[in-house]
Image: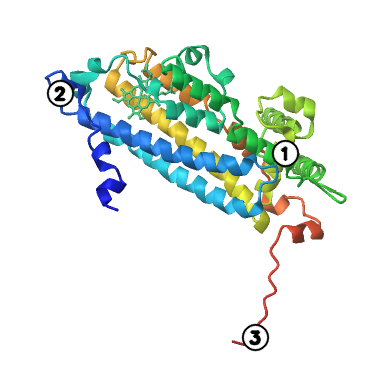
Amino acid sequence: MHYAEYLKLDQILNAQKLESENQGNPAHDEMLFIIIHQAYELWFKQILFELESIRTIFEKDIVDDQHLGLIVSRIQRINKILKLLVDQVAIIETMTPSAFLEFRDLLNPASGFQSLQFRKLESILGLKKEQRSTVEKKFFNTRLKKHEQVELDKELLKKSLKELIDEWLGRLNLLEFDNFSFWKEFKNTTDQIFESDKNLIKKNSTLDETEKERELLNLSKVKDSFNVLFNDEEYKKQNFTISRQSLLSALFITTYQDYPLMHLPFKIISGFLEMDEFITKWRYAHALMAKRILGQRIGTGGSSGHEYLRKTAERHVLFADFFKLNTFLIPKSQRPELPQKLSDLLSYHFAVKNHGL
Ligand code: HEM
């Protein structure tokens, strides 16, 4: 095997055909423009490859515990790549708006809207057609080729990672154990915390009566927000996208993350949160870069440009429920104590003997 043959370098390194050169007026920065897009598409391919393998594990009726470490290490790999993709925006930003103008019109109507891999990435993670705004619905697949639209439709019919994680968390069965009911204990604990906070406000001599009333009102609002956890009707009124059972499982995992058996599930939850953060950072960085380079100009795909891109960054936080989870965290010192049997089940038990070595 030869290096260049194995890596198909003759194909890859001959895949930068400058349209400006083709038209007899070479624009220096078009090389960078092509290479950076190709680099992004290659990394999208790797991310999709990793996500697909994670999906295969989650698709099983029983997610094998021995695969959890593998899932975590793949999530971590994806997040390292995503960080690179965010940082890479700085490279395209070295291109000035006027350098871009030298070849921009030659690209019409090609656009990022035609990145099938980006759409697949959104889809495998869990972005559904119906979550898109009216403007997005107009653009998200109509700029793709017919066979790409068919491929994307097929992808959209598959279960996304978000749905599979919701199912996995819902099945975890951590909340009831013998006579121990996590959410009942959790409610008792939070009721006690709120009661003690209430007394602290009432006794606070630095606050006048109006300030006390305001603080008490705020506290009762926070307490009400906790009710969504304990009541199906309240839960349904909020815009949660995973089941209440799954949210409570995620809360259990987060609350007892230091128990060895909860460690990997916690890393999975926080890994997807981090993934969401990187994608949102990329969306914002890309939107800002488009603003800087295009100003008020519309995109070559026909959108309003920066404004459109900024809105997608705001709208599409896929694991928003996991972000909300942190609202309900309580200090470790006050968390409900687990029954000994359950605590043992969630811990490793190595019989360590001192042989006097
Ligand atoms: C000069 C640099 C760039 C500019 C000015 C720019 C501008 C834009 C604009 C205005 C859009 C909205 C669609 C449209 O109306 O055409 C868009 C979409 C998009 N661009 Fe870029 N872009 C640039 C570089 C990149 C790079 C390097 C990538 C990497 C793959 C990329 C990926 C995308 C993707 C995936 C979309 C679709 C986003 C969505 O619908 O949420 N763009 N871009």
The correct choice, above or below, for 314 with respect to 67 in the image is above
- Circle nearer the N terminus (1, 2): 2
Q: Residues within 10 Å of mark 3 (few under 14, many from 20)?
A: few
Q: Please tell me which residue is depicted at 55% across the width and 51% down the height of the picture.
A: 70
Ligand 1 positioned in quadrant: top left
Instruction: Looking at this view, name the residue that lies furthest to the right.
Output: 179
Q: Please tell me which residue is depicted at 69% across the width and 25% down the height of the picture.
A: 238
Q: Secondary structure at mark 2?
A: helix
User: Disc 1 marks which amino acid?
Assistant: Gly
Task: Give the residue number, with chain letter if any, for mark 2.
Answer: 21
Verify CB contact (< 8 Å) between mark 2 and mark 3: no
Q: Secondary structure at mark 3?
A: loop
The correct choice, above or below, for 75 with respect to 303 in the image is below
- Circle nearer the N terminus (2, 3): 2
Q: Is residue 201 visible?
A: no
User: Disc 2 marks which amino acid?
Assistant: Glu
Task: Give the residue number, with chain letter if any, for mark 1.
Answer: 170
- Near-viewer residue (245 or 222): 245
On screen, residue 328 versus residue 184, left or right, reads: left
The correct choice, above or below, for 273 with respect to 266 in the image is above
Front position among marks 1 and 2? 2
Q: CA distance from mark 2 to mark 3?
A: 76 Å
Q: Position of residue 273 (x, y in %)?
A: 55, 39
Instruction: Looking at this view, name the residue that lies furthest to the front.
Output: 1
Verify CB contact (< 8 Å) between mark 1 and mark 3: no
Instruction: Looking at this view, name the residue that lies furthest to the bottom.
Output: 356
Q: Residues within 10 Å of mark 1 (few under 14, many from 20)?
A: some
- Near-viewer residue (84 or 213): 84
Front position among marks 2 and 3? 2
